[in-house]
């Protein structure tokens, strides 16, 4: 079987990984930049229990609050995404979708742990995550939200000096995104063909450019929308810095959406939730400054910008039409759900499953794509 994958971000890499484990030898990844390039900016928090349903009034209020404090800027959104969000405002997906998402959360947490047990060369820590609140009312609302969390995670309310309080999730984990990509490239995907090319043609019969495959998997993040999917971009920035972290585990500043993860040889600081398809990084420093509340920064190693590919309700979109499988849309939690997304994409490609119910919504609408994929703000 000859398989082509468009997009070598974290979802594309996991898809290739599971296909290879199923014995598929002829796998080609098309990636417009280097392997993992679309995903390395992330904080590397494996936090599937912190899922946000996007199509709610609560989420719109959160975004407005983010906008007031400058954590969000709204430049462009995908029109199809916006229409679907409004059409489905406050609608809950079927229980089957929640059940699948819970399974995906557990599978993904376990897979990272298993890979770290094989060899922890990617700074894996299963020391949990703390959500920190500055404002007492927000903190109380945060605790209330956890009582109704559909994932039923374990959590503890903790006191943290200088803050209204924190919520600690002991079951969550974290890793270095850069080291994880390096590990996959050197070990699990070392014999997979990677073509560095921005794909401009995907056809439902299984064609990428002019090459015919038995199955094509499109895991191209926000660019998957060009196949006619309602996916929009929320842009953010990830810094690797040297310095002194004031925390010893992964921490999220809840009101601002800043994440800090102290790793063995650097600290990751991420932030930004801009509705924006452009590749500019002019707002990045604002989030570094905010992160300095939790880190005495000596110097910056590097910074990468990246996108959260969001579906209208935040649930991933995974499914197959004819000879094309798509896997995208997990938004804030692409790393957290990537193992499960890759596994499902692989199972769909191999015909082990035909459909994923609610997760496959929208997939019947996908179309052939031919054209130049814009890399700037012309969304
Ligand atoms: C600041 C920030 C912090 C984050 N932190 C976390 C976190 O801690 N935990 C978590 O779970 N998630 C986090 N995320 C979300 C996560 O980064 C994304 O959900 C994830 O990267 C999506 O993975 P993907 O493989 O679907 O898409 P991408 O990461 O976007 O990868 C898609 C790849 O496809 C390539 N591509 C696109 N079009 C083409 C084409 N036409 N031809 C060839 N190649 C193409 C791109 O170059 C890219 O490498 C964060 C996001 C941001 C912005």
Image (spheres, grey):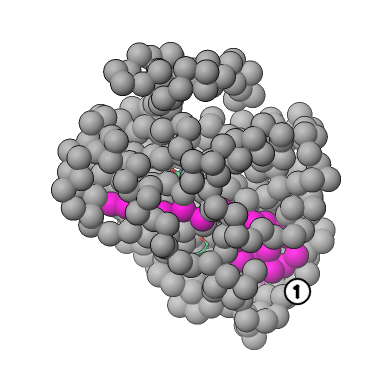
Magenta highlight on residue 215: yes
Quarter of the image where the N terminus is located: bottom right
Which residue corresponds to the image point at 60% horizontal and 60% vertical from the top-left? 75
**Please, what secondary structure does the residue beneath circle 1 have?**
loop
Q: Is residue 258 left or right of residue 289?
A: right
Residue 175 locus on image (x, y percent): 34, 42
The one nearer the camera, 325 or 292, is 292
Which residue corresponds to the image point at 53% horizontal and 78% vertical from the top-left? 198
Q: Is residue 81 visible?
A: yes
Please give the count of numbered marks on the rendered protein.
Answer: 1
Quarter of the image where the C terminus is located: bottom right
Q: In which image quadrant can residue 264 be found?
A: top left
Q: Is residue 308 visible?
A: no
Residue 153 locus on image (x, y percent): 53, 21
Which residue corresponds to the image point at 71% horizontal and 34% vertical from the top-left? 57
Residue 33 locus on image (x, y percent): 44, 72
Q: Is mark 1 within 8 Å of ligand 1?
A: no
The one nearer the camera, 190 or 176, is 176
What range of the chain is rendered magenta? 214-240
Within-10-Å neighbours for mark 1: few <14, some 14–19, many 20+: some
Residue 99 locus on image (x, y percent): 69, 30
Query: Is 15 rendered above or below residue 316?
Result: below
Which residue corresponds to the image point at 64% horizontal and 86% vertical from the top-left? 210
Magenta highlight on residue 304: no
| Residue pointed to by mark 1 | 368
Q: Residue furthest front?
A: 68
The one nearer the camera, 225 or 12, is 225
Query: Is 199 rendered above or below residue 314?
Result: below
């Amino acid at each position: 079987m000859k398989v082509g994958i468009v997009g070598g971000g974290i979802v594309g890499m996991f898809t290739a990984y599971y296909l290879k484990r199923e014995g598929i030898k002829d796998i080609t990844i098309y990636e417009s930049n280097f392997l993992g390039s679309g995903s390395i900016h992330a904080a590397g928090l494996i936090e599937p229990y912190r899922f946000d349903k996007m199509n709610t009034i609560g989420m719109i209020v959160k975004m407005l609050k983010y906008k007031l404090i400058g954590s969000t800027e709204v430049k462009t959104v995908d029109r199809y995404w916006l229409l679907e969000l409004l059409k489905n405002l406050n609608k809950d997906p079927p229980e089957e979708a929640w059940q699948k998402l819970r399974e995906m959360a557990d599978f993904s947490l376990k897979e990272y742990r298993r890979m770290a047990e094989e060899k922890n060369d990617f700074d894996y820590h299963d020391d949990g995550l703390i959500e920190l609140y500055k404002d007492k009312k927000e903190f109380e609302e945060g605790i209330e939200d956890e009582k109704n969390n559909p994932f039923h995670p374990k959590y503890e309310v903790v006191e943290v000096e200088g803050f209204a309080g924190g919520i600690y999730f002991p079951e969550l984990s974290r890793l270095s995104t850069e080291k994880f990509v390096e590990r996959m490239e050197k070990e699990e995907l070392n014999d997979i063909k990677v073509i560095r090319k921005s794909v401009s043609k995907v056809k439902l019969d299984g064609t990428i450019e002019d090459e015919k495959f038995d199955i094509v998997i499109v895991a191209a993040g926000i660019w998957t929308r060009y196949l006619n999917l309602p996916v929009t971009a929320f842009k953010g920035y990830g810094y690797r810095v040297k310095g002194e972290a004031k925390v010893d585990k992964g921490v999220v500043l809840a009101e601002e959406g800043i994440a800090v993860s102290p790793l063995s040889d650097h600290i990751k600081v991420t932030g930004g939730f801009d509705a924006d398809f452009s590749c500019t990084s002019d707002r990045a420093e604002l989030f570094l400054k905010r992160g300095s509340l939790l880190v005495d920064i000596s110097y910056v190693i590097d910074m990468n910008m990246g996108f959260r590919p969001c579906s209208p309700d935040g649930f991933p979109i995974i499914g197959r039409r004819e000879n094309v499988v798509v896997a995208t849309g997990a938004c804030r939690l692409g790393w957290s759900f990537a193992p499960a997304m890759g596994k499902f994409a692989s199972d769909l490609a191999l015909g082990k499953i035909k459909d994923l119910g609610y997760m496959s919504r929208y997939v019947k609408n996908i179309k052939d794509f031919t054209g130049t994929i814009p890399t700037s703000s012309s969304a």
